[in-house]
Image: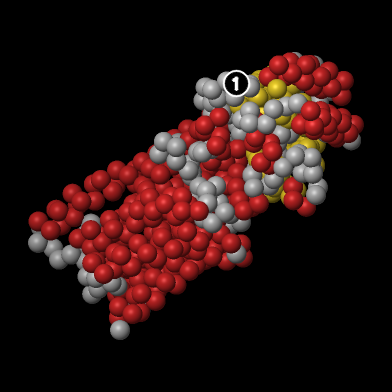
Amino acid sequence: MPHARSLGWLCAGALLMAIGPHVPEITLPGAWFAVAFLLHGWRGLPTRPGLPCLALALYAALAIANRGTIPAGGPLYFVIIAPLTALALFPFVLDRWIGRRIVGWASTLVFPMAFVAQELLRSRLPHGPGTWGSLAYTQYGNLALMQLAAVTGIWGITFTMTWGASVVTWAWERGFASITVRPLLATYVGLLGAITVVGGLRISLSPAPARTIRAAAVSFPGDLLTQMEMFRIADGRTPVEGAVAGKIARLHEWFFENTEREARAGAKLVAWPEMNFLVLADDEPAALERAQRLAAKEHIYLAMAIGAVHPGAPKPFQNKTVLVDPSGRIAYSYLKTWPVVGWEEGVMQPGDGHLPVVPTELGRLSTAICFDGDHPDFMRQVGRGGAGLSILPANDWAAVKRSHLEMAAFRAIENGVPLLRPTSFGISGAFDSLGRVLGSTDHFSGAPTMVVQIPVGTVLTLYPRIGDLFAWLCVAGCALAPVLARRRAGSGEAPVTATATPLSGVG
């Protein structure tokens, strides 16, 4: 019967993990319960039958949760889920292998350190998903907790959540009413309360921005080209001739006419979504000259997200953002650094890995492109460069439109920099330096333009200076935990069991 209850908790946790991404109303609280239920269910099962059960639960949860998010279908999709499941198992396995050999409350630290470590290492894998799937992103909307990203990056949020699951499970095993568990529960509640209070104070005491500007995100006209047609043009499979050439010409007119309209309505900055301005490489100079004339005429900053096509080249696609200033001068031209695994990786010419941060009349402006923004350590260049506004053009699809927008809010908080995200086939949005939404427009609603008043200026944060130090300390903690466990065993102390272990009896 105890094993049946443990399996029930395992299934409950997997269910919450599976449906959370598809039911926004339960994502934020559900993630806390999902991890706690999974850990409690796993600890209540013997290792040999328990590990396959845990693996199956995690595999099913990840397969359902990521449906539509991972751009793959058929059998390949289910193959991709397998290594993700193996990574997800790591903190649970380490918790049992090491955590139960450590006496007292210190054992509760193994699971959160391992969870952060696996998220960090997954984000650094070659051809990997970046930080997609991080537990921290489930806390979008909890602004007070999100402020922790300004210090530790998203890793501190993940640690806070998973340590909570470990503490609750530790107390659960010993009886919540036991005097033994009260000091640790009080410590965790106090820490969580302090994080919440400090984060809330950071938000409430933040001064009003000294300056805001009117910015417009002009998106792609969805009835002109499908997303698949855009990809086929970008990689050279569809020649730009005949009817296709006519569509490209109308596309160009759309962007120039709508940019002019927004400029005359008062916009000081107009930005276009990722790769939306498709152009043959031979025609790009003429298009740039036209954009320079328009920017100078209307006295605006124009951030052109260009998909430049080089027919016949081994990698024919250049995914770039070009910023034209009000004098008609090109302030920067940036090539996307991080291609998405799959189609884009096979056709895109990557950039040099340096994000531009340039002084302008508006302040210091910077840019990155779409998947670049899913790599926090890479985006630290924005904060280190003292940017006052980051422009992040993107091109999404329906299944990820909400989650990918929300991820961008954490980049604004980490770097203390407002962020403008013009997006096609997704949600255009803008955030201030505290991650607060300034405006958004859903491309699928038929509204191609978003207009916002966005501040320009930097709020000093620690994360751009120390980077992923907190996460690497968790990695180091995982490496040192076996040594601590051996020392405990060698000292003759009893390993942690389901019976109470006094908090005062550990170092």
- Callout 1: few (<14), some (14-19), or many (20+) C-alpha neighbours within 10 Å? few
Colour logic: secondary structure
Q: Quadrant of the C terminus?
A: bottom left
The residue drawn where x is 57% and y is 66% is 26
Of residues 121 and 481, the one nearer the viewer is 121
Residue 167 placement (x, y as % from top left): 36, 65
Of residues 455 and 25, the one nearer the viewer is 25
Of residues 290 and 438, the one nearer the viewer is 290
Number of labels in the image equals: 1
The residue drawn where x is 32% and y is 54% is 90
Residue 458 placement (x, y as % from top left): 63, 34
Indicate left or right for 46 with 419 as reference. Answer: left
Asked if residue 211 can be seen in this view, the reply is no
Indicate left or right for 251 with 199 as reference. Answer: right
Residue 157 placement (x, y as % from top left): 47, 52
Which of the 4 quarters of the picture holds residue 270?
A: top right
Q: Quadrant of the N terminus?
A: bottom left
| Vertical side of 76 occupied by 244: above or below | above
Residue 299 placement (x, y as % from top left): 84, 23
* Residue labelled with disc 1: 312
| Vertical side of 417 occupied by 169: above or below | below
